Image: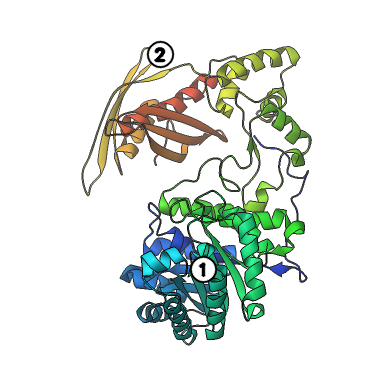
Amino acid sequence: MTIDSNVARSTDGSAHADVERVRIFDTTLRDGEQAPGFSMDRRAKLRMAQALEALGVDVLEAGFPKASPGDFAAVAEIAAALKTTTVCGLARCQPGDIDDAARALEKARRSRIHVFLSTSPLHREHKLGMSKAQVLDAAVAGVERAHGLCHEVEFSAEDALRTEPEFLVEVFSAAVAAGATTLNAPDTVGYTTPSEIVELFEYLRRHVRGADKVVFSSHCHDDLGMAVANSMAAISAGARQVECTINGIGERAGNAALEEVVMALKVRGALFGVDTRIDTRKLYPTSRLLTQLTGQAVPRNKAIVGENAFAHESGIHQHGMLKHRGTYEIMLPQDVGIGETRLVLGKHSGRAALRQRLEALGHTPDEASMEAILGRFKTLADKKREIHDEDLEAIALGHDPDAQGPWHLLQLSSSTHMGGSASASVKLAHDDGREIGEAAIGDGPVDAVLRAIERATGSDLELTDFLVRAVGEGGDAQGQAQLTARHAERAWRGHGVSTDIVEATALAALAIVNRISRQTPAAAPVAVAHL
Protein backbone atom coordinates (compact mmCIF):
# COMPACT_ATOMS: atom_id res chain seq x y z
CA MET A 1 0.00 0.00 0.00
CA THR A 2 1.28 3.48 -0.84
CA ILE A 3 0.52 7.04 0.09
CA ASP A 4 0.96 10.36 -1.67
CA SER A 5 4.56 11.55 -1.97
CA ASN A 6 3.86 15.27 -2.24
CA VAL A 7 3.01 16.03 1.38
CA ALA A 8 6.15 16.44 3.47
CA ARG A 9 9.75 16.80 2.47
CA SER A 10 12.82 15.77 4.44
CA THR A 11 15.41 18.34 5.44
CA ASP A 12 17.37 19.47 2.43
CA GLY A 13 20.94 18.35 2.91
CA SER A 14 22.24 19.28 -0.52
CA ALA A 15 25.73 20.76 -0.61
CA HIS A 16 26.26 24.50 -0.45
CA ALA A 17 29.43 26.46 -0.88
CA ASP A 18 29.34 27.68 2.73
CA VAL A 19 28.84 24.21 4.25
CA GLU A 20 31.83 22.10 5.25
CA ARG A 21 32.08 18.65 3.72
CA VAL A 22 32.62 15.42 5.59
CA ARG A 23 34.58 12.91 3.52
CA ILE A 24 33.04 9.45 3.33
CA PHE A 25 35.72 6.78 3.54
CA ASP A 26 34.13 3.47 2.59
CA THR A 27 35.76 0.28 3.87
CA THR A 28 33.09 -2.20 2.78
CA LEU A 29 35.65 -4.03 0.63
CA ARG A 30 38.29 -4.19 3.38
CA ASP A 31 36.97 -4.13 6.94
CA GLY A 32 33.51 -5.22 5.80
CA GLU A 33 34.60 -7.97 3.42
CA GLN A 34 36.99 -9.59 5.90
CA ALA A 35 34.13 -10.27 8.34
CA PRO A 36 32.82 -13.88 8.41
CA GLY A 37 30.08 -14.43 5.84
CA PHE A 38 30.86 -11.40 3.65
CA SER A 39 33.73 -12.58 1.46
CA MET A 40 33.58 -11.55 -2.20
CA ASP A 41 35.52 -12.64 -5.26
CA ARG A 42 37.32 -10.18 -7.55
CA ARG A 43 34.43 -9.76 -9.93
CA ALA A 44 32.04 -8.99 -7.07
CA LYS A 45 34.51 -6.56 -5.50
CA LEU A 46 34.91 -4.63 -8.75
CA ARG A 47 31.16 -4.44 -9.23
CA MET A 48 30.71 -3.18 -5.68
CA ALA A 49 33.55 -0.68 -6.08
CA GLN A 50 31.96 0.80 -9.18
CA ALA A 51 28.63 1.12 -7.36
CA LEU A 52 30.35 2.87 -4.46
CA GLU A 53 32.00 5.31 -6.84
CA ALA A 54 28.61 6.04 -8.42
CA LEU A 55 27.25 6.54 -4.91
CA GLY A 56 29.83 9.28 -4.41
CA VAL A 57 32.20 7.98 -1.74
CA ASP A 58 35.34 10.12 -1.47
CA VAL A 59 37.76 7.34 -0.55
CA LEU A 60 37.33 3.63 -1.19
CA GLU A 61 39.49 1.24 0.81
CA ALA A 62 39.73 -1.55 -1.74
CA GLY A 63 41.59 -4.07 0.40
CA PHE A 64 44.77 -5.13 2.19
CA PRO A 65 47.21 -5.94 -0.66
CA LYS A 66 49.67 -7.81 1.56
CA ALA A 67 46.97 -10.12 2.90
CA SER A 68 46.85 -12.39 -0.17
CA PRO A 69 47.53 -12.47 -3.92
CA GLY A 70 43.77 -12.24 -4.45
CA ASP A 71 43.50 -9.11 -2.35
CA PHE A 72 46.44 -7.56 -4.19
CA ALA A 73 44.87 -8.32 -7.57
CA ALA A 74 41.48 -6.95 -6.49
CA VAL A 75 42.99 -3.68 -5.27
CA ALA A 76 44.98 -3.32 -8.50
CA GLU A 77 41.92 -3.98 -10.66
CA ILE A 78 39.80 -1.50 -8.73
CA ALA A 79 42.58 1.12 -8.78
CA ALA A 80 42.73 0.91 -12.58
CA ALA A 81 38.95 1.04 -13.01
CA LEU A 82 37.80 3.91 -10.81
CA LYS A 83 37.81 7.42 -12.24
CA THR A 84 36.77 9.88 -9.52
CA THR A 85 37.12 8.15 -6.17
CA THR A 86 40.44 7.96 -4.31
CA VAL A 87 41.47 4.30 -4.07
CA CYS A 88 43.09 3.25 -0.81
CA GLY A 89 45.13 0.22 0.22
CA LEU A 90 45.74 -0.82 3.82
CA ALA A 91 49.24 -1.53 5.11
CA ARG A 92 50.92 -2.18 8.42
CA CYS A 93 53.86 0.06 9.23
CA GLN A 94 56.15 -2.47 7.59
CA PRO A 95 58.15 -1.94 4.38
CA GLY A 96 56.79 -5.03 2.64
CA ASP A 97 53.17 -4.08 3.29
CA ILE A 98 53.69 -0.50 2.13
CA ASP A 99 55.55 -1.48 -1.03
CA ASP A 100 52.86 -4.01 -1.96
CA ALA A 101 50.16 -1.40 -1.43
CA ALA A 102 52.02 1.07 -3.61
CA ARG A 103 52.38 -1.46 -6.44
CA ALA A 104 48.70 -2.40 -6.23
CA LEU A 105 47.75 1.29 -6.47
CA GLU A 106 50.08 2.18 -9.35
CA LYS A 107 47.28 2.75 -11.88
CA ALA A 108 44.99 4.70 -9.56
CA ARG A 109 44.11 8.22 -10.68
CA ARG A 110 44.22 9.19 -7.02
CA SER A 111 45.88 6.84 -4.52
CA ARG A 112 46.09 6.64 -0.75
CA ILE A 113 48.11 4.28 1.44
CA HIS A 114 46.51 3.74 4.83
CA VAL A 115 49.20 2.74 7.32
CA PHE A 116 48.26 1.61 10.80
CA LEU A 117 49.94 0.68 14.05
CA SER A 118 48.56 -0.16 17.49
CA THR A 119 49.16 2.47 20.16
CA SER A 120 47.20 1.39 23.26
CA PRO A 121 49.00 -0.05 26.31
CA LEU A 122 47.15 -3.35 25.89
CA HIS A 123 48.20 -3.72 22.27
CA ARG A 124 51.73 -2.47 22.83
CA GLU A 125 52.33 -5.10 25.49
CA HIS A 126 50.36 -8.12 24.33
CA LYS A 127 50.14 -7.72 20.55
CA LEU A 128 53.31 -5.89 19.52
CA GLY A 129 55.72 -6.36 22.39
CA MET A 130 56.96 -2.82 21.74
CA SER A 131 57.73 0.19 23.87
CA LYS A 132 56.29 3.65 23.29
CA ALA A 133 59.54 4.74 21.64
CA GLN A 134 59.50 1.75 19.30
CA VAL A 135 55.90 2.42 18.33
CA LEU A 136 56.71 6.06 17.66
CA ASP A 137 59.71 5.17 15.48
CA ALA A 138 57.75 2.54 13.52
CA ALA A 139 54.89 4.96 12.87
CA VAL A 140 57.21 7.65 11.54
CA ALA A 141 59.10 5.17 9.36
CA GLY A 142 55.86 3.81 7.93
CA VAL A 143 54.43 7.20 7.06
CA GLU A 144 57.72 8.40 5.56
CA ARG A 145 57.99 5.33 3.35
CA ALA A 146 54.40 5.60 2.13
CA HIS A 147 54.68 9.35 1.57
CA GLY A 148 56.83 8.98 -1.52
CA LEU A 149 54.80 6.15 -3.05
CA CYS A 150 51.27 7.56 -3.38
CA HIS A 151 49.27 10.77 -3.59
CA GLU A 152 48.28 10.88 0.07
CA VAL A 153 48.91 9.02 3.32
CA GLU A 154 46.54 8.22 6.14
CA PHE A 155 47.83 7.11 9.53
CA SER A 156 45.67 5.13 11.95
CA ALA A 157 46.49 4.61 15.61
CA GLU A 158 44.83 1.24 16.17
CA ASP A 159 42.87 1.10 19.44
CA ALA A 160 43.24 4.88 19.73
CA LEU A 161 40.32 5.25 22.13
CA ARG A 162 42.14 3.13 24.73
CA THR A 163 45.46 4.91 24.18
CA GLU A 164 46.83 7.48 26.61
CA PRO A 165 45.77 10.86 25.11
CA GLU A 166 49.21 12.38 25.63
CA PHE A 167 50.91 9.53 23.77
CA LEU A 168 48.31 9.68 21.00
CA VAL A 169 49.11 13.37 20.54
CA GLU A 170 52.81 12.53 20.36
CA VAL A 171 52.32 9.81 17.73
CA PHE A 172 49.92 11.89 15.63
CA SER A 173 52.20 14.93 15.74
CA ALA A 174 55.10 12.80 14.50
CA ALA A 175 52.91 11.30 11.75
CA VAL A 176 51.97 14.78 10.50
CA ALA A 177 55.62 15.80 10.41
CA ALA A 178 56.41 12.62 8.46
CA GLY A 179 53.83 13.43 5.76
CA ALA A 180 50.43 12.09 6.86
CA THR A 181 47.49 14.13 5.60
CA THR A 182 44.73 12.22 7.42
CA LEU A 183 44.82 11.10 11.06
CA ASN A 184 42.44 8.33 12.05
CA ALA A 185 41.54 7.70 15.71
CA PRO A 186 39.62 4.42 15.54
CA ASP A 187 37.45 2.92 18.23
CA THR A 188 38.77 -0.47 17.16
CA VAL A 189 36.79 -2.54 19.66
CA GLY A 190 33.63 -0.44 19.92
CA TYR A 191 34.35 0.51 23.54
CA THR A 192 33.86 4.27 23.72
CA THR A 193 30.82 6.50 24.16
CA PRO A 194 29.77 9.70 22.36
CA SER A 195 30.82 12.00 25.20
CA GLU A 196 34.24 10.34 25.43
CA ILE A 197 34.87 10.55 21.71
CA VAL A 198 33.93 14.24 21.66
CA GLU A 199 36.40 14.88 24.48
CA LEU A 200 39.19 13.01 22.67
CA PHE A 201 38.74 14.66 19.26
CA GLU A 202 38.57 18.12 20.79
CA TYR A 203 41.75 17.32 22.75
CA LEU A 204 43.55 16.07 19.62
CA ARG A 205 42.59 19.11 17.58
CA ARG A 206 43.94 21.39 20.31
CA HIS A 207 47.21 19.59 20.95
CA VAL A 208 48.40 17.75 17.81
CA ARG A 209 51.09 19.81 16.11
CA GLY A 210 49.98 20.65 12.58
CA ALA A 211 46.35 19.78 13.33
CA ASP A 212 45.19 22.56 11.03
CA LYS A 213 46.93 20.87 8.07
CA VAL A 214 45.28 17.45 8.33
CA VAL A 215 41.87 15.82 8.30
CA PHE A 216 40.83 14.00 11.47
CA SER A 217 38.99 10.76 10.84
CA SER A 218 36.66 8.53 12.85
CA HIS A 219 36.44 4.74 12.50
CA CYS A 220 33.93 3.23 14.94
CA HIS A 221 32.88 -0.35 15.58
CA ASP A 222 29.47 -1.38 16.84
CA ASP A 223 30.24 -3.79 19.68
CA LEU A 224 28.09 -1.77 22.09
CA GLY A 225 25.70 -0.56 19.39
CA MET A 226 27.11 2.97 19.31
CA ALA A 227 29.16 3.07 16.10
CA VAL A 228 26.95 5.59 14.31
CA ALA A 229 26.33 7.66 17.46
CA ASN A 230 30.07 7.79 18.11
CA SER A 231 30.77 8.74 14.49
CA MET A 232 28.26 11.59 14.68
CA ALA A 233 29.82 12.73 17.96
CA ALA A 234 33.25 12.75 16.31
CA ILE A 235 31.88 14.91 13.50
CA SER A 236 30.44 17.35 16.01
CA ALA A 237 33.92 17.53 17.58
CA GLY A 238 35.63 18.34 14.28
CA ALA A 239 36.22 15.04 12.49
CA ARG A 240 35.88 15.61 8.76
CA GLN A 241 36.21 12.04 7.57
CA VAL A 242 34.08 9.08 8.65
CA GLU A 243 35.10 5.50 7.91
CA CYS A 244 32.06 3.32 7.42
CA THR A 245 30.55 0.45 5.44
CA ILE A 246 27.37 -0.25 3.51
CA ASN A 247 24.82 -1.96 5.79
CA GLY A 248 27.29 -1.54 8.67
CA ILE A 249 29.12 -4.78 7.87
CA GLY A 250 32.53 -5.39 9.40
CA GLU A 251 34.48 -7.24 12.05
CA ARG A 252 32.41 -8.68 14.91
CA ALA A 253 29.31 -6.48 15.31
CA GLY A 254 30.31 -4.37 12.31
CA ASN A 255 31.22 -0.78 11.52
CA ALA A 256 29.30 2.46 11.44
CA ALA A 257 26.69 2.12 8.68
CA LEU A 258 27.40 4.51 5.81
CA GLU A 259 23.73 5.02 4.99
CA GLU A 260 22.91 5.95 8.59
CA VAL A 261 25.76 8.45 8.91
CA VAL A 262 24.95 10.08 5.59
CA MET A 263 21.21 10.38 6.22
CA ALA A 264 21.77 11.66 9.76
CA LEU A 265 23.88 14.46 8.29
CA LYS A 266 21.24 15.15 5.65
CA VAL A 267 18.13 15.07 7.82
CA ARG A 268 19.82 16.92 10.70
CA GLY A 269 21.83 19.22 8.46
CA ALA A 270 20.92 22.31 10.46
CA LEU A 271 22.31 20.71 13.61
CA PHE A 272 25.62 19.44 12.24
CA GLY A 273 26.26 22.14 9.63
CA VAL A 274 28.17 19.78 7.35
CA ASP A 275 27.36 17.73 4.26
CA THR A 276 28.64 14.90 2.10
CA ARG A 277 28.76 14.41 -1.65
CA ILE A 278 26.85 11.13 -1.49
CA ASP A 279 23.95 10.71 -3.91
CA THR A 280 21.53 9.48 -1.28
CA ARG A 281 19.07 8.20 -3.91
CA LYS A 282 21.55 5.40 -4.58
CA LEU A 283 21.81 4.22 -0.96
CA TYR A 284 19.09 1.58 -1.19
CA PRO A 285 20.23 0.15 -4.56
CA THR A 286 23.81 -0.04 -3.26
CA SER A 287 22.65 -1.80 -0.12
CA ARG A 288 20.65 -4.30 -2.17
CA LEU A 289 23.65 -4.95 -4.42
CA LEU A 290 25.77 -5.85 -1.40
CA THR A 291 23.16 -8.32 -0.17
CA GLN A 292 23.09 -9.93 -3.61
CA LEU A 293 26.88 -10.22 -3.81
CA THR A 294 27.31 -11.62 -0.29
CA GLY A 295 24.05 -13.49 0.17
CA GLN A 296 23.60 -11.73 3.53
CA ALA A 297 20.28 -9.93 3.95
CA VAL A 298 19.79 -6.89 6.17
CA PRO A 299 17.34 -7.12 9.09
CA ARG A 300 13.82 -5.90 8.37
CA ASN A 301 14.17 -3.19 11.01
CA LYS A 302 17.54 -1.91 9.74
CA ALA A 303 17.59 1.89 9.65
CA ILE A 304 17.37 3.58 6.23
CA VAL A 305 17.54 0.44 4.04
CA GLY A 306 15.61 -2.22 5.98
CA GLU A 307 12.31 -3.55 4.65
CA ASN A 308 10.43 -1.88 7.50
CA ALA A 309 12.25 1.46 7.38
CA PHE A 310 9.40 3.05 5.40
CA ALA A 311 6.58 0.64 6.26
CA HIS A 312 3.74 1.24 8.73
CA GLU A 313 1.28 -1.29 10.14
CA SER A 314 -0.11 0.42 13.23
CA GLY A 315 -3.54 1.84 12.57
CA ILE A 316 -2.70 5.00 14.50
CA HIS A 317 0.45 5.52 12.44
CA GLN A 318 -1.31 4.74 9.17
CA HIS A 319 -4.07 7.22 9.95
CA GLY A 320 -1.48 9.89 10.70
CA MET A 321 0.46 9.10 7.52
CA LEU A 322 -2.67 9.40 5.42
CA LYS A 323 -3.29 12.84 6.91
CA HIS A 324 0.31 14.12 6.71
CA ARG A 325 3.46 12.18 5.95
CA GLY A 326 5.50 14.18 8.42
CA THR A 327 3.56 12.74 11.35
CA TYR A 328 5.62 9.55 11.31
CA GLU A 329 8.38 9.95 8.69
CA ILE A 330 11.36 12.29 8.93
CA MET A 331 12.57 11.67 5.38
CA LEU A 332 11.13 10.54 2.08
CA PRO A 333 11.74 6.98 0.91
CA GLN A 334 12.69 8.47 -2.46
CA ASP A 335 15.56 10.29 -0.72
CA VAL A 336 17.33 6.94 -0.23
CA GLY A 337 16.23 5.27 -3.46
CA ILE A 338 13.13 3.43 -2.21
CA GLY A 339 10.10 3.83 -4.43
CA GLU A 340 7.44 4.66 -1.89
CA THR A 341 6.18 4.24 1.65
CA ARG A 342 4.19 1.08 2.35
CA LEU A 343 1.19 0.95 4.62
CA VAL A 344 1.35 -2.72 5.56
CA LEU A 345 -1.97 -4.33 6.27
CA GLY A 346 -1.87 -6.56 9.34
CA LYS A 347 -3.58 -7.08 12.67
CA HIS A 348 -2.60 -3.58 13.86
CA SER A 349 -4.07 -1.81 10.82
CA GLY A 350 -7.28 0.21 10.95
CA ARG A 351 -10.30 1.07 8.83
CA ALA A 352 -8.74 4.06 7.03
CA ALA A 353 -5.81 2.16 5.56
CA LEU A 354 -8.01 -0.83 4.69
CA ARG A 355 -10.53 1.33 2.85
CA GLN A 356 -7.83 3.16 0.92
CA ARG A 357 -6.29 -0.09 -0.29
CA LEU A 358 -9.65 -1.57 -1.23
CA GLU A 359 -10.42 1.53 -3.28
CA ALA A 360 -7.04 1.22 -5.01
CA LEU A 361 -8.05 -2.34 -5.96
CA GLY A 362 -11.36 -1.12 -7.39
CA HIS A 363 -13.69 -1.86 -4.46
CA THR A 364 -15.90 0.87 -2.97
CA PRO A 365 -17.94 -0.85 -0.25
CA ASP A 366 -20.70 1.03 1.58
CA GLU A 367 -20.56 1.34 5.35
CA ALA A 368 -22.47 -1.88 6.03
CA SER A 369 -20.28 -3.89 3.66
CA MET A 370 -17.17 -2.20 5.04
CA GLU A 371 -18.06 -3.32 8.55
CA ALA A 372 -18.35 -6.93 7.40
CA ILE A 373 -15.11 -6.70 5.40
CA LEU A 374 -13.31 -5.21 8.40
CA GLY A 375 -14.47 -8.11 10.57
CA ARG A 376 -13.22 -10.71 8.07
CA PHE A 377 -9.99 -8.76 7.67
CA LYS A 378 -9.30 -8.71 11.42
CA THR A 379 -10.00 -12.44 11.67
CA LEU A 380 -7.52 -13.20 8.89
CA ALA A 381 -4.96 -10.71 10.23
CA ASP A 382 -4.83 -12.59 13.53
CA LYS A 383 -3.58 -15.63 11.59
CA LYS A 384 -1.20 -14.00 9.08
CA ARG A 385 1.76 -11.64 9.49
CA GLU A 386 0.80 -9.54 6.48
CA ILE A 387 -2.32 -9.28 4.33
CA HIS A 388 -1.61 -9.04 0.59
CA ASP A 389 -3.77 -7.74 -2.25
CA GLU A 390 -4.99 -11.20 -3.19
CA ASP A 391 -6.21 -11.69 0.39
CA LEU A 392 -8.11 -8.41 0.24
CA GLU A 393 -9.69 -9.37 -3.08
CA ALA A 394 -10.97 -12.60 -1.55
CA ILE A 395 -12.30 -10.79 1.53
CA ALA A 396 -14.02 -8.11 -0.57
CA LEU A 397 -15.66 -10.77 -2.74
CA GLY A 398 -16.77 -12.81 0.26
CA HIS A 399 -14.36 -15.68 -0.44
CA ASP A 400 -12.22 -17.52 2.08
CA PRO A 401 -8.59 -16.40 1.63
CA ASP A 402 -7.36 -19.60 3.28
CA ALA A 403 -9.46 -21.94 1.14
CA GLN A 404 -7.62 -24.85 -0.45
CA GLY A 405 -7.90 -25.91 -4.07
CA PRO A 406 -9.21 -26.23 -6.64
CA TRP A 407 -5.84 -27.77 -7.59
CA HIS A 408 -4.13 -30.31 -5.31
CA LEU A 409 -0.74 -32.01 -5.62
CA LEU A 410 -1.04 -35.80 -5.67
CA GLN A 411 2.37 -36.93 -6.89
CA LEU A 412 5.72 -35.32 -7.62
CA SER A 413 9.02 -36.71 -8.79
CA SER A 414 12.15 -34.98 -10.03
CA SER A 415 15.68 -35.85 -11.05
CA THR A 416 18.74 -33.90 -12.03
CA HIS A 417 21.94 -34.79 -13.84
CA MET A 418 25.31 -33.12 -13.31
CA GLY A 419 26.17 -31.14 -16.40
CA GLY A 420 22.77 -31.76 -17.93
CA SER A 421 19.11 -30.86 -17.64
CA ALA A 422 16.62 -31.86 -14.94
CA SER A 423 13.24 -33.49 -15.31
CA ALA A 424 10.09 -33.50 -13.22
CA SER A 425 6.63 -35.00 -13.34
CA VAL A 426 3.51 -34.00 -11.42
CA LYS A 427 0.05 -35.42 -10.95
CA LEU A 428 -2.62 -32.89 -9.97
CA ALA A 429 -6.23 -33.31 -8.90
CA HIS A 430 -8.94 -30.72 -9.46
CA ASP A 431 -12.04 -30.27 -7.32
CA ASP A 432 -14.19 -31.06 -10.37
CA GLY A 433 -12.84 -34.61 -10.36
CA ARG A 434 -10.13 -34.33 -12.98
CA GLU A 435 -6.67 -35.81 -12.47
CA ILE A 436 -3.94 -34.54 -14.77
CA GLY A 437 -0.35 -35.72 -15.06
CA GLU A 438 2.41 -33.86 -16.89
CA ALA A 439 6.20 -34.01 -17.17
CA ALA A 440 8.75 -31.44 -18.23
CA ILE A 441 12.47 -30.80 -18.64
CA GLY A 442 14.12 -27.71 -17.20
CA ASP A 443 17.42 -26.06 -16.36
CA GLY A 444 17.15 -27.47 -12.85
CA PRO A 445 14.64 -29.42 -10.76
CA VAL A 446 12.77 -26.29 -9.67
CA ASP A 447 12.49 -25.04 -13.24
CA ALA A 448 11.34 -28.48 -14.38
CA VAL A 449 8.57 -28.81 -11.78
CA LEU A 450 7.28 -25.33 -12.57
CA ARG A 451 7.14 -26.18 -16.27
CA ALA A 452 5.24 -29.39 -15.45
CA ILE A 453 2.68 -27.48 -13.39
CA GLU A 454 2.37 -24.98 -16.23
CA ARG A 455 1.45 -27.74 -18.63
CA ALA A 456 -0.93 -29.45 -16.23
CA THR A 457 -2.95 -26.32 -15.49
CA GLY A 458 -2.95 -24.93 -18.99
CA SER A 459 -1.77 -21.33 -18.78
CA ASP A 460 0.94 -19.20 -17.23
CA LEU A 461 2.10 -16.18 -15.32
CA GLU A 462 5.27 -14.15 -15.14
CA LEU A 463 7.47 -15.26 -12.27
CA THR A 464 9.12 -12.19 -10.70
CA ASP A 465 10.64 -13.45 -7.45
CA PHE A 466 11.71 -16.80 -6.02
CA LEU A 467 13.12 -17.37 -2.54
CA VAL A 468 13.91 -20.53 -0.62
CA ARG A 469 14.97 -20.47 3.02
CA ALA A 470 15.37 -22.99 5.83
CA VAL A 471 12.79 -23.16 8.60
CA GLY A 472 14.65 -24.62 11.57
CA GLU A 473 18.09 -26.22 11.71
CA GLY A 474 19.68 -29.51 10.82
CA GLY A 475 19.50 -31.86 7.88
CA ASP A 476 15.78 -32.51 8.38
CA ALA A 477 14.87 -28.82 8.53
CA GLN A 478 11.94 -27.75 6.42
CA GLY A 479 12.40 -25.44 3.48
CA GLN A 480 9.98 -22.63 2.74
CA ALA A 481 9.58 -21.56 -0.87
CA GLN A 482 8.12 -18.14 -1.63
CA LEU A 483 7.07 -17.23 -5.16
CA THR A 484 5.82 -13.94 -6.54
CA ALA A 485 4.31 -13.72 -10.00
CA ARG A 486 2.38 -11.18 -12.06
CA HIS A 487 -1.00 -11.85 -13.57
CA ALA A 488 -3.52 -9.33 -14.89
CA GLU A 489 -1.25 -6.43 -13.87
CA ARG A 490 -1.06 -7.60 -10.25
CA ALA A 491 1.46 -9.39 -8.08
CA TRP A 492 0.38 -12.72 -6.60
CA ARG A 493 2.24 -14.54 -3.85
CA GLY A 494 2.34 -18.13 -2.74
CA HIS A 495 4.38 -20.14 -0.33
CA GLY A 496 4.90 -23.80 0.42
CA VAL A 497 6.71 -25.68 3.17
CA SER A 498 8.31 -29.11 2.91
CA THR A 499 11.54 -30.92 3.80
CA ASP A 500 11.95 -31.19 0.00
CA ILE A 501 12.54 -27.76 -1.55
CA VAL A 502 11.24 -28.92 -4.95
CA GLU A 503 7.98 -29.98 -3.32
CA ALA A 504 7.86 -26.69 -1.40
CA THR A 505 8.22 -24.86 -4.72
CA ALA A 506 5.41 -26.89 -6.30
CA LEU A 507 3.12 -26.11 -3.36
CA ALA A 508 3.95 -22.41 -3.61
CA ALA A 509 3.17 -22.40 -7.34
CA LEU A 510 -0.15 -24.15 -6.76
CA ALA A 511 -1.02 -21.64 -4.03
CA ILE A 512 -0.76 -18.86 -6.62
CA VAL A 513 -2.72 -20.81 -9.22
CA ASN A 514 -5.46 -21.56 -6.71
CA ARG A 515 -5.79 -18.00 -5.48
CA ILE A 516 -6.27 -16.68 -8.97
CA SER A 517 -8.65 -19.49 -9.88
CA ARG A 518 -10.83 -18.87 -6.82
CA GLN A 519 -11.05 -15.13 -7.39
CA THR A 520 -11.58 -15.32 -11.17
CA PRO A 521 -13.57 -18.55 -11.57
CA ALA A 522 -14.53 -17.82 -15.15
CA ALA A 523 -10.93 -17.34 -16.21
CA ALA A 524 -8.73 -20.04 -17.62
CA PRO A 525 -6.51 -21.86 -15.09
CA VAL A 526 -3.20 -20.17 -14.43
CA ALA A 527 0.24 -21.64 -13.82
CA VAL A 528 3.77 -20.44 -13.34
CA ALA A 529 5.99 -19.77 -16.31
CA HIS A 530 9.65 -20.63 -16.67
CA LEU A 531 12.27 -19.41 -14.21
Seen at 48% across and 16% down, the residue is 403
Q: Percent x, y for residue 320? A: 75, 33
Mark 2 and mark 1 in contact? Answer it, CB < 8 Å. no
Please provide percent x and percent y for residue 485.
Answer: 49, 36
Query: Horizontal placement of 324 versus 97: left or right?
Result: right
Q: Residue 293: percent from the left, percent from the top?
A: 43, 54
Above or below, comparing residue 197 to residue 142 in the picture: above
Q: Position of residue 498 (x, y in %)?
A: 33, 27
Quadrant into which the C terminus falls: top left
User: Residue at point 70% right, 57% down?
Assistant: 266
- How far apart are labels 2 and 1 at the CA level? 60 Å
**Residue 503, placed above or below residue 191:** above
Q: Is residue 416 left or right of residue 381?
A: left
Q: Secondary structure at mark 2?
A: loop
Q: Is residue 523 above or below residue 301?
A: above
Tell me the kind of residue under disc 2.
Asp
Depth check: give the residue in front, 434 or 406.
Answer: 406
Residue picked out by circle 1 = 60
**Residue 388 found in image quarter:** top right
Nearer the viewer's eye, disc 2 or disc 1?
A: 1
**Which sits in the foreground, 284 or 391?**
284
Upstream in the sequence, badge 2 or badge 1? 1
The colour scheme used here is rainbow
Q: Nearer the viewer, residue 308 or 132?
A: 132
Helix, strand or loop under label 1? strand
Residue under label 2 = 431
Q: Residues within 10 Å of mark 1 (few under 14, many from 20)?
A: many
Instruction: Name the residue located 37 percent from the left edge and 27 percent from the top edge.
Output: 497
Residue 234 visible = no
What amino acid does circle 1 point to?
Leu
